[in-house]
Image: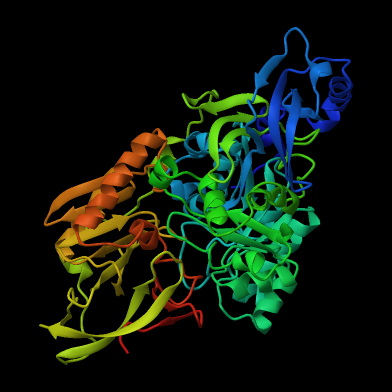
Amino acid sequence: MGVQADDLKGVASTMSTLKSWAEMAPELVDVAVGRKPAALVVRNCQWVNVHSGEIIPESEIAVYGGRFAYCGEDALHTIGDDTEVIDAGGRYLVPGLCDAHMHVESGMLTVTQFARAVIPHGTTSMFIDPHEIANVLGMEGVRLMHDEAAGLPINVFVQMPSCVPSAPGLENAGAELGVEDVRDAMTWPNIVGLGEVMNFPGVATGDPKMMGEIAATKDAGKTVGGHYASPDLGPPFHAYVAGGPADDHEGTREEDAIARVRQGMRAMLRLGSAWYDVASQITAVTKRGLDPRNFILCTDDCHSATLVHDGHMNRVVRHAIDEGLDPVVALQMATLNTACHFGMERELGSITPGRRADFLIVSDLPKLEIDAVYARGELASDHDGIKLSMPEFTYPDHVRNTVNMKGDLEAADFKIEAPYEASKVVARVIGVVENQAPTKALERELTVRNGEVQMDREADVCQIAIVERHRATGAVTNCFVSGFGYNKNCAVAATVAHDSHHMIVVGTDHNDMALAANRLREVQGGVAVFNEGKELALVNLPIAGLMSDELPGLVAAKADQMVQAMVEMGCTLNNAYMQHSLLALVVIPELRISDIGLVDVRRFEKVELFV
């Protein structure tokens, strides 16, 4: 779906509610010198200055037109009759937090509801890659999230998805995007770069599509996001860096972070709902002494329950501090470093004149206890809840009808026939790794009964299936997975299956697998947990089968019930749902499932289920 420049006039108008620095500069100068009163002055604060890396006591900050106008010792000269004055009581003034790489869809929420969930946690800027919805709806999905993001009262910037599908030839997504789509998107007002380039073998081998998309982005003067999900730091890694990606969030080891920074990339260290990659890499700074300016904190994927109960970027910053990072340095990695990476350091990421007035009032810096959040100079949230008025954004009806299956499934659709007559066979099995995105390529001996290969619950081997849901082909791909620990008859089905987002079903009982899949067809998307024919939990995600526009608390409550149901079935993994959702991501080693079969991501090729 092409998008013309005229179509974006409304978006540009929405974004212009915050005037540009050029428009505001004369007034900001007048406020700074005292010729014009400020709209807001914060007095008696400890100014966390991420540029100088210091905490400046007894500071005063003046705001006008949604931007900082004066930052110094005494703002008395900026106070007029109508100026709102806040006494911070010696508390810290911290820049609003930035998430440098994330997928809104992983939160199970629309952009608006995601913002509603994270604002109380101090997040005022997000750089989102909507490649989940792009795999279902193509350019229309990207455009919808772009427009929704542009109308919000906090800063939500969009990176154009680069890999739809993520691995051509190894999966079939609901859409396909190419160089011309990227070139078109670079003209949209809220696009800041190219989303994570997951096809790292393509870049390393000079694939024309990948190189064309990167070139179109660089020609537009925008940032190329990286995704190098391989432990190989030899020539393929160097080729990838030479190909243009400017950052990477797939590192899991200290040497990964060091290699990226030494090659001129920004190392993005993530802490999501299930990806715990900060502790293992932050030692590059805390122990090896590398310059922290090129390290950035991010979340990548957080589901709604994490957002509501545990936090967002504040959770990541606290974790980094707990791992030995100086609090101010941790904040630099979640504010200024991110702004610099996207070429926006004159616009956000610090409490300094001219920047957007996004700041937090914090009572305890190491614990990052947030008392109030301000976005563009307006009170966004305090202990009484969110204060900003959130605009309404309506997704069209057809976007709520994307689970296209040929018909209801039966238990027989999940049977795996033995490849030959034998009482035992050796099967390739996907091995789940707790708190990490990579999997293990395992081999397990399984029993054959009446020509059908059996699961082995005692050895923690159950079935995993991909049900095609974009074109109603009726195709079901069946394989084996280990690591969930299910010890009862059960099934978990979801229409969230990164990145092609077919339906993914994991279970120990074929009947439950069929029931869970059919339930999601009925409600047009979400996550369902079944046990012995009974529905234990259902999270409705009707928008592209990925998101809900319900309030975050309601979605989180359903997600909590889902997680609890998985626990009751024997699963002890931390945030097992996130592991479940990534088992079809055929760009992260070692072994994955797609709609075409079992994929060995170490070699980027389809392999047989049986050895």
Residue 433: name its quadrant.
bottom left
179 and 29: which one is in front? 29
Question: As drawn, is 289 to the left or to the right of 304?
Answer: right
Q: Residue at x 36, y 41 (%)?
A: 556
Q: Name the colouring of the figure.
A: rainbow
Q: Quadrant of the C terminus?
A: bottom left
Residue 187: name its quadrant.
top right
317 above or below 25? below
Question: As drawn, is 584 to the left or to the right of 58?
Answer: left
52 above or below 200? above
Question: As drawn, is 154 to the left or to the right of 411?
Answer: right
Which residue reaches farthest top?
A: 81
Does the rendering let one see residue 350?
A: yes
Residue 544 appears at what percent x and percent y? Answer: 42, 46
79 above or below 368? above
Q: Residue at x 54, y 69 (%)?
A: 252
Residue 377: name its quadrant.
top right
Residue 334 appears at what percent x and percent y? Answer: 63, 49
328 above or below 601? above
Residue 541 appears at what percent x and percent y? Answer: 36, 44
Residue 30 appears at what percent x and percent y? Answer: 88, 20
Question: As drawn, is 577 to the left or to the right of 587?
Answer: left
Does the rendering let one see residue 129?
A: no
Q: Exactly how many numbered labels are in the figure?
A: 0
Q: Residue at x 11, y 57 (%)?
A: 532
